[in-house]
Amino acid sequence: MTARLPDGRPPRGMRPNGMVRTAGPGVWFTLTGFLLALPFNLPWLPFPFAAAGFGLWRLWIRYVRPSSRAVNLVSAPASELRPGDWFRPYGGFGPACQVAETRLDQDDLVHVSLRGGRELTLAPDYRVRRVRLRN
C-alpha cells in the first residue's frame, strides 16, 4: 500500500519506506550564491550568483533528488492522527509520511503505522507537524 496525494498520484520524492522527501526553502542556496560572489568586489555580481544558486536548487529538487513541496499546517498531538493524515515525524522540517493506521496500546503509547510499512511508537501528547503536500 503506497501513499497517495488526494488526486491519486504518488508524491514526488517518495522513498520505498513510505517517507516523502520534501524540498525545503531555496533561500539557503540563494544566499550561498550571493555570498560566494562578494569576494570578487563587483557590486552587480552577487545578484546573478544568487539567481544561479536558486536555479541550482530548483534543478536539485526536480531532477537530482526529487522532492515534494510541503506546506506546514498546525501541530497536533500524536493521539489525534487519523488514517490519511500527512505529518512530519521529526519536527517542523524533514521528510513527511502518511498515516495508514493508529492504535493505542495498554502502555498509553500510540502506534502509528505508515503507508510503506514503517511503524512509529509515540507518546500520545508528542506534537507532530501536519503538512499538506503540493506535488
Image (tube, rainbow, N blue to C red):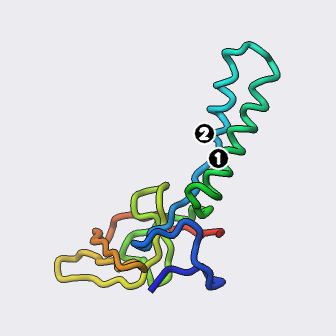
User: Three-letter amino acid code at disc 1?
Assistant: Trp
Above or below: residue 32 compared with residue 57: above
Q: Which mark is residue 42?
A: none
Label total for image: 2
Quadrant in the picture for the C terminus = bottom right
Going from the N terminus, do you reach mark 2 or mark 1 first? 2
Q: Quadrant of residue 124?
A: bottom left
Q: Quadrant of residue 78?
A: bottom left
Q: Position of residue 94 (x, y in %)?
A: 47, 56
Q: Position of residue 42 (x, y in %)?
A: 78, 16
Above or below: residue 19 compared with residue 64: below
Q: Which mark is residue 28?
A: 2
Residue at the image point whose x is 62% and y is 81% from the top: 9
Residue at the image point whose x is 55% and y is 81% from the top: 4
Left/right of residue 55 with respect to residue 99 in the rendered view: right
Q: Residues within 10 Å of mark 1 (few under 14, many from 20)?
A: many
Give the residue pinned by disc 1: 57
| Residue 50 or residue 76, whichever sits in front | 50
| Residue 16 or residue 81, whichever sits in front | 16
Quadrant in the picture for the N terminus = bottom left
Above or below: residue 97 compared with residue 113: above
Tags 2 and 1 touching, CB below 8 Å:
yes
Q: Alpha carbon of mark 2 to alpha carbon of mark 1: how far?
A: 9 Å
Left/right of residue 103 with respect to residue 129 in the rendered view: left
Residue at the image point whose x is 72% and y is 45% from the top: 55
Closer to the eye: label 2 or 1: 1
| Element type where label 1 sits in the image | helix
Q: Position of residue 23 (x, y in %)?
A: 58, 56
